[in-house]
Amino acid sequence: MIQLFHVTRRYNTGAPALSDVSFSIEKGEFVFLTGASGAGKTTLLRLLFRDDLPTAGQVMVNNENLQSMPASRVPYLRRQIGVVFQDFKLLRRKTVFENVAYATQVIGLPASEQRRRTYRVLEMLALNHRLHHFPDQISGGEQQRVAIARALVNRPLVLLADEPTGNLDPELSLAIIETFKEINAQGTTVLVATHDRSLIQRMARRVLTLAQGHLAPAGSA
Amino acid sequence: MTAILLPILKEARDGLTRHPALTLLATLSMAVSLYVLGMFVLIAWNVRLATATLGKELQMQVYMRPDATREEIEAVRMGLVSDDAVAEARLVPAEEARRRFEGRFPRLSGISAGLGENLFPASFEVVLRPAHQGAEEAERLAKAYKVGPGVDEVRFDRGWFERLTALLDFFRNGGYGLGALLVMAVMVTVGAVVRLTVLARREEIEIMKLVGATASFIRAPFLLGAATQGLAGGLLALAGLRLTWWMLVRSNPYRENPLLALAAGRFPPADVLAILPLLGLLLALAAAALSLGRASAQPG
């Protein structure tokens, strides 16, 4: 489902954010991406939904080479990928319900299906009491769950999550990861970037470790 | 279709109502620039009416001899009406000329009646077309018709012709220049306002792209919103213009200064002033399309 071949990404200054990173993730896998702050986790995730392009190497998602993908195809790639952003990236002028429903609107679902899916995912994430609140009116943890709900609402082929439990208490963190497991069980490939070692140890899933832009050998995490 | 169209309409509405300060500021800025243009249209339209009336003052008279036959008068009339420079050639028969004299100088009416025969010859009042209202053109016509059949004399005031045509040219050419300048100012203002609106919502556009919205799905509500603001700005300008005119024609300076009546005596008709909302709509639409071009483009 996801393949990286000798991917390097340099900053404008020339310093490498990622250096010669190669790995593959099979369809239906659940993988953690870990590493210290600044190790290159967010940069790597951005390459996977083509928010950025590598300086060298190839990135393949769902058998599509993202470098040669025409710009007009990018929205369709992104509709297959649910992304939970570290800074949530919620639309400030839209309510919780509208933020999540927006993802269903862009794919042109009928209005009734948009509502059904949105209510369902918000209920799953215990946000049904916040439907008509704006992001600035809810807590950081709730904003994070709205971002997760938006990523899940279109039942994506791939779910990318950048520190999805960063603002949540341990109990809620576990609940979120359980949700990801359920989504994964339904066939969605999940890649979670986190530096929460306890969470990774509890889950016992494959781990990719980045250190200063390099991928550490398997088993060294 | 409705699954795509309804969200776009809703998005456009939300874009306007959920950024009230931005919407108000943008609409008012457009309204002010269109109002200034509207003031120019109001004055230009009135001056145009006035100059058209002045143009009619640029008359020349072709006097026929008292013994001119009907055939000669008709030949001169035919010559005048078929001349490219002539807008109107009105025959004033001898009898009407006498009536006019008696009307204007009632104390002298007894003299003309006492003489028995009509001292006032038939004549033509010739009005020139706007493009031919020059002293040279009048000179040419005078020379040509002076030797016409049954013509006694051709009269026109060369000095008056020159002063009046210079004045008309000044208003026409100056009007075009000032009009073009004001349209450019409106274009710059509307363009800047719409660009600022798009910039203020750049983060929103980025998020929309990240969740898989196509460029057209992002652009459509912005274009609709900008067009609505442009149209509203134009209508506001129109309302402001009407109010200004209404207050002006009821003011003391207006009553005391005939020049004001000349410049703003009549309110232009709807088909002239429709230019304001139409221009607002089109310029806002064009500015939004340009500003969004880069902002909503997917990474290449």
Image (cartoon, rainbow, N blue to C red):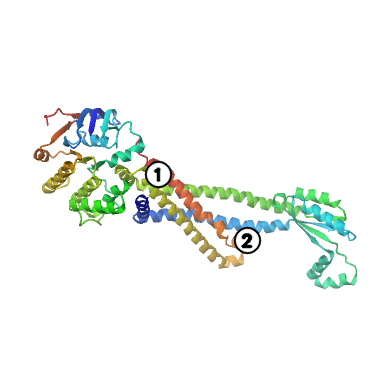
- Residue B270: where, in percent of width, then height? 55, 60
Say what amino acid the circle numbered 2 marks.
Leu
On the question of residue B189 being in view, the answer is: no
Q: Residues within 10 Å of mark 2 (few under 14, many from 20)?
A: some
Res. A188 image quadrant: top left
Res. B228 image quadrant: bottom left
- Residue B143: where, in percent of width, then height? 82, 49
- Residue B23: where, in percent of width, then height? 39, 54
- How many marks the image carries: the answer is 2
CA gap between label 2 and label 1 equals: 45 Å
Tell whether B77 sits left or right of B174. right
| Residue in the image at 82% along x and 63% along y | B93
| Residue in the image at 80% along x and 54% along y | B78
Please determine if labels 2 and 1 lie on a single subunit. yes
Say what amino acid the circle numbered 1 marks.
Leu
Ranked by sequence position, the earlier of labels 2 and 1 is 2
Q: Residues within 10 Å of mark 1 (few under 14, many from 20)?
A: many
Q: Chain of mark 2?
A: B
- The front one of A67 and A86 is A67
- The front one of B77 and B264 is B77
Secondary element under disc 2, as helix, strand or loop, is helix
Res. A51 image quadrant: top left
For label 2, the residue is B262
- Residue A189: where, in percent of width, then height? 20, 38
Tell whether A151 sits left or right of B242. left
| Residue in the image at 22% along x and 46% along y | A152
Tell whether A176 sits left or right of B19. left
- Quadrant where the C terminus of chain A lies? top left
For label 1, the residue is B292
On the question of residue B77 being in view, the answer is: yes
Q: Chain of mark 1?
A: B
